[in-house]
Every structure is written in C-alpha cells, then in structure tokens.
Amino acid sequence: MSKKKENTENTTVEETVEAVETEEVSAEAETAEPTAEEKLQEELKAQKESYLRLAAEYDNYRKRTQAEKLRVYADATAKAVEELLPLSDSVVAALDSTPEDDAQRKGIELIGNQLAKCFEKLGVEAFGEVGEAFDPVYHNAVARTENPDLPQNSIAMVFQKGFKTGDKVIRPAMVQVANCG
C-alpha cells in the first residue's frame, strides 16, 4: 500500500506541476503583446467606429440645414406676401366700389385673379369668412354684435381678410364677432 500511496503522491505532484506550468503559459499569453493581426483588427474597428460617427454627424448636419432652409424660405415668402397685402386690399376695395357695368371692372378683376394665383403658387391661403368660428390665433376681433341667426362666437362680418402660409399667420383677419359672452 505504501507503494500505491507513493505512486498517487507522485502523480499528484506531476499533475500539479503541469497545471502550474499551464497557468504560467496562459498568463504569459495574456500579458504578451498582441499579434500584428490583432493590432490590425483593433485599428480596423476604431476606423469603422470613427466612420460611423462621422456619417451620423453629417446626416444630422444635412437634416439641420435642410430644416433651416425651409424656415428661411417660409419667412422670406411671408415677408414678401406681407408687403403685397396692401395691394390686394386695394384691388378688393376697387372691385367693391366699381359698379358691375363699368368697363374698368373687368381689368380690376383680372388683376385680382392674377394676384390670387400668385398667392396660391406661394402656398398662401386667405381666411376669415362670415359664419366661421372665431379663433383668436387667426382672427383679430375689433367689434362684436348680437345676431340670432349666427352661432355663439362666430364671425358676423369681415373687415379685412387674413392670410397664412402653412401654419404661419401672415396677417390675422380683422372681424366682428357675433354672440360672444
């Protein structure tokens, strides 16, 4: 039995020595410098990450500048239309004051139609009609009246049309409000 015990001890010692040597080799492998392939893989990974970040930054920049261009265009259109609105008001006033049988009325109507087409091409819409619900965002109430034929807080009379482009109000409509209270 003593020989068996001795044999078992030798085997255990040999196994222990092998295990320690294996651990040392694996520890050396972990602390050893990376191979050329590993270095290239790391460099490639860093370059890919850098490229993706740059692509994302460029995409954000492109979207920002596109939105800014649209805002600038909308503001410029609104400013130009704002300058043309007195002309539109004058054409409407000329039509209202010219009798139906007057020869000049046809010319004034043509000018008014051309102006309306220009506004349409620019995406400008007129608003403010009798019977519409009053909305302080779009309408400027300058008078009020009681009228049983109209619903509460509706427009009874339009003194000056309002204009907007998209959601941007260029000029609110000047109106008389019925049955407010």
Image (cartoon, rainbow, N blue to C red):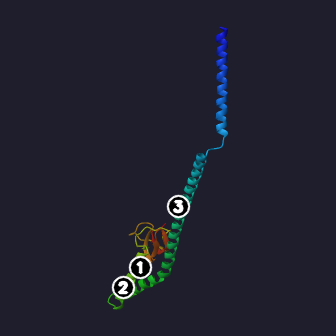
Instruction: Name the residue tied to disc 2.
Output: 110
Distance from disc 2 to disc 1, alpha carbons, whole Å, reads: 12 Å
Residue at 56% over, 57% down: 51
Please provide percent x and percent y for residue 22: 64, 30
Residue type highlighted by circle 2: Leu
Instruction: Name the residue tied to disc 3.
Output: 59
Mark 3–mark 2 contact, CB under 8 Å?
no
**In the displayed image of the protein, which residue is found farthest to the left?**
101
Instruction: Name the residue tied to disc 1.
Output: 118
Q: Is residue 76 visible?
A: yes
Q: Nearer the viewer, mark 1 or mark 3?
A: 3
The image shows residue 23, relative to residue 88, as above or below, that is: above
Residue at 42% over, 85% down: 91
Please provide percent x and percent y for residue 37: 58, 46
Please provide percent x and percent y for residue 122: 44, 75
Residue 39 or 111: which is nearer the viewer? 39
Mark 1–mark 3 contact, CB under 8 Å?
no
Residue type highlighted by circle 1: Cys
